[in-house]
Image: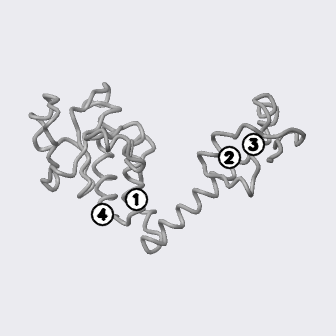
Amino acid sequence: MTSCAGCSEREATLKCPTCVKLGVNPSETNYSYCSQACFKANWKSHKKIHASFSSAALASEQSAVRSKLGGDITNSLSFSPKLASIKVTPNSPSENTEKNFPRNLHNASEIFLLTGNVSSARTLSSSTSWIIELLENGPDGKSTLKLGRAVICWECGYAGIPKNADMCDKVAVDVKGVCWNCGRDGETNFLK
């Protein structure tokens, strides 16, 4: 029986969904509560767990990336947080349910780095910086615009207009975007 982390008097039946998502170890930190009211009453102190765990997880992840890449190589790369607003479209229903499928370009950059694919991470960084600027400021620096059907290439990291853009704009389901950078079409997903 787990006692409530708030009042310590009753049996805990609810778990904090954020703690579960963050992977907080329940044997090290109690994040179970007897009721929603008790959880709400203890929120000020409880939310500190999220902050400390998030910071520790980030530091651990950065350390793992640095050791995998052989040092402080990540400092030479920069990824805009705005990459999270550019979504990666799954090619199939199975890809859509895949746990490790990158939902956006920020996730894609993390995958490239965590797998040690630094050259693809660099290509993604350089090919997306102008896209973000163009989407924000427009070609004349004043008006915003929409980008056509862009792709990300998992082979080389390129993100942008495909070579076969004219065919892709027709929104045909069976058309694959061809990477402008390396020419491959089997390893691409559309962006939105």
Give the labeled residue for mark 1: 77
Image quarter (top left, top right, bottom left or bottom right) of the C terminus:
top left
Q: 175 or 126, which lies in front?
A: 175
Q: Nearer the viewer, mark 3 or mark 1?
A: 3
Q: Are marks 4 and 3 in contact (CB under 8 Å)?
A: no
For numbered disc 2, what is the local secondary structure? helix
Q: Which residue is mark 2?
A: 50
Amino acid type at circle 2 is His
Residue 98 drawn at (x, y percent): 38, 46
Task: Give, as a three-letter code, the residue at label 4.
Answer: Ser
Q: Please give the residue where the numbered disc 4 appears in the rendered image.
A: 119
- Give SS at disc 1: loop
Report whether 98 appears left or right of 38. left
Q: Earlier in the sequence, mark 1 or mark 4?
A: 1
Q: Amino acid at mark 3?
A: Ser
Q: CA distance from mark 2 to mark 3?
A: 14 Å
Q: To which quarter of the image does residue 161 belong? A: top left
- Sequence order check, earlier mark of 2 and 4: 2
